[in-house]
Structures are given as C-alpha cells and as structure tokens.
Image (spheres, rainbow, N blue to C red):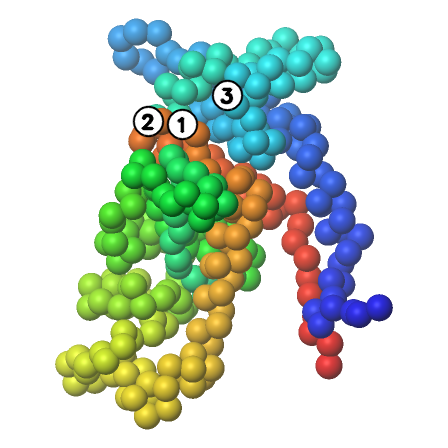
C-alpha cells in the first residue's frame, strides 16, 4: 500500500470540516437568521427592501454549494425553517434573481495583519456552452459565453482577499488596480503570471510597497536602468525561465491555481443567472462561500523527509 508524499497531519479535524460542509445549519447560522429581514428604513422615498443583502448572499451560497436552481433553493429554505419551527420564510426566487444584480457581498475575512505573499490569477466561468464530450464529438457552437473571475489569494490562509468579475475580452492586467487598490493591509510579494508583465502593473505593485514576482515575457527587453525587472530578464537570458522560477519562489503562484480548482470543483464552474450584474452577484456569493469553507478548516501537510 503506497503512502502519500505529503500526508495530512490533522486528519480528524479536517475530516470533521469536510462533514460540516454539508450542514445546513452551518450555512444558515444564527447570525444569518437574526439579520434575515430589514428592521429599519433607508430614509428615502419608498419602502425599504424586505430581505437584507446577507439573506440574498446566503440564498446564493446555498444554491451554488448544493448545485440547485433558484426555485429548488427557495423550497429547501422554506422546508428548513418549517422543520426548525422558525418564523422565517425564504425570499421568492424572482426576488433573488433581481436582488442579485445589486447585492453587496461581504466576502472578505477579518484582517489577520500583513500579507506576506499575494498570488493573483484569473479563470473562465461558463455561462452558455456545452460539455467537453459534445465539443470533441461535434465541435463547439457559436454561442459560447464566458465570464472571467480574477482572484487575489493569501497563500498562508488560502483566503480570497480580493475578487473581481469581468467580461471574457478584458485583459488580466487591466483588472489589477481593482484587485489591489481596495487593500489596506501591507503587502510583501505579489505573484502573477506573464499576462501582468507591464509597466503599469509593476508601478502599481511598487506603489503598494510590495515586490513584484512576475516572469518577463519571451524575448523581453530591458526597461530603464535600475528597474528590478531587469534582473529577472538577465537571469532568464542566461539560465532560462525554469532557473528563474526556482530562485524566485515563483512556485507559490500555483496556490492560486489550487484556489481556482477548488472554486470550480465545489461550485460546478458554471453560473446560471442570465443578467450580467446578476452573474456578478452570484459569483461574488460563491467567493464568500469559499472563504466560509476555509474557516471550517484546511488540511495541514508536512513533507516526509
């Protein structure tokens, strides 16, 4: 019987966290139920909304985690409240469809101090399109629509500290200011792939007081004298890209790929709402679900010597 090269050392705790992922009382906790309805008025003309943003976010998280439709999620919540004998009711599915366009999702976890490393990457989420087998067998249809999810991940805690949704034709480097500017925590090193190799990206990272770890593009030229990127270009010309990745610690960026994989594995990698603003709300609720799962517990691995 083979053994893992990196065995999990906290298996009892991690096993319990895996079980709790399916607990309805974990997703619909006491805090969510206490803030289920709006209790005050917004101070403007018209009545205030009945359900809070936290309620809409909880609804969307349940929808994604259990891979349900909006109608089925409404039925699940109503039956849960009936069994718990709680005087609450689920939002109507049409209400959630509309509120998802404007919902403010609080996905960030409480600050844990300075971020030593920050890894950034993006991935595509399917809106319309076929499965892999159908594409290989009959070819892809013209109606293939994707949205891009850009994530900034703390590799120590695996928390998603910044997230942004864009259209599929938006370049990764264009979204970098949206990810980094809201962060008030001190940054150490920022890891990203070659798509972020631009002067604007390096300047932004430098203004945040961080060091950029971005591989220069193939046949990249030197920038102005004394720029930190020039050292990476010279190393790549002399020793190659693999050597630069080894000495720079670029392998830590793979943790962003791990976050993308976990996102798609848990939430099916597909969004269902048809309005773009609604899709943004749906995806951000899924990001909140990912951070909520991290709070349950993650595996701790120690390499065998």
| Secondary structure beneath label 3 | helix
| Secondary structure beneath label 2 | loop
- The extreme left residue here reads 224
Q: Which mark is residue 273?
A: 1
Q: Are marks 2 and 1 in contact (CB under 8 Å)?
A: yes
Q: Nearer the viewer, residue 212 or 218?
A: 218
Label 2 to label 1: alpha-carbon separation: 6 Å
According to the picture, the residue beneath numbered tag 3 turns out to be 70
Q: Which of the marked residues, 1 or 3, is nearer the chain's N terminus? A: 3
According to the picture, the residue beneath numbered tag 2 turns out to be 275
Q: Nearer the viewer, residue 69 or 284?
A: 69
Is there any visible trace of residue 58 in the rendered image? no
- The extreme right residue here reads 1
Tell me what residue is drawn at x 40 percent, y 13 percent.
Answer: 49
Is there any visible trace of residue 134 in the rendered image? yes
| Secondary structure beneath label 1 | loop
């Amino acid at each position: 019987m083979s053994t893992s090269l990196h065995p999990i050392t906290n298996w009892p705790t991690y096993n319990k966290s895996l079980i709790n992922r399916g607990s309805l009382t974990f997703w619909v906790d006491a805090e969510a139920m206490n803030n289920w309805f709006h209790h005050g008025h917004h101070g403007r003309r018209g009545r205030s909304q009945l359900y809070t943003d936290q309620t809409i976010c909880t609804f969307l998280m349940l929808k994604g985690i259990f891979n349900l439709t909006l109608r089925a999620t409404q039925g699940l919540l109503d039956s849960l409240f009936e069994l718990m004998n709680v005087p609450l009711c689920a939002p109507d599915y049409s209400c959630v469809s509309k509120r998802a366009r404007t919902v403010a999702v609080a996905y960030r976890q409480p600050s844990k101090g300075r971020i030593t490393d920050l890894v950034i990457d993006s991935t595509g989420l399917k809106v319309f399109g076929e499965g892999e087998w159908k594409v290989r067998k009959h070819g892809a249809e013209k109606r293939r629509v994707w949205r891009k999810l850009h994530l900034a991940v703390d590799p120590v805690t695996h928390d998603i500290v910044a997230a942004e949704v864009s259209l599929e034709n938006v370049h990764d480097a264009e979204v970098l200011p949206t990810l980094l500017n809201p962060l008030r925590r001190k940054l150490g090193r920022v890891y990203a792939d070659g798509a972020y190799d631009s002067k604007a990206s390096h300047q932004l990272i430098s203004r945040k007081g961080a060091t950029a770890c971005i591989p220069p593009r193939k046949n990249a030229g030197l920038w102005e004298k004394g720029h930190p990127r020039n050292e990476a270009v010279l190393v790549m010309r002399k020793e190659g890209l693999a050597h630069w990745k080894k000495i720079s610690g670029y392998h830590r960026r793979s943790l962003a790929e791990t976050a993308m994989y976990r996102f798609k594995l848990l939430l099916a990698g597909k969004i269902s709402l048809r309005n773009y603003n609604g899709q943004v709300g749906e995806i951000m609720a899924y990001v909140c679900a990912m951070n909520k799962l991290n709070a349950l517990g993650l595996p701790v691995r120690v390499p065998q010597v």
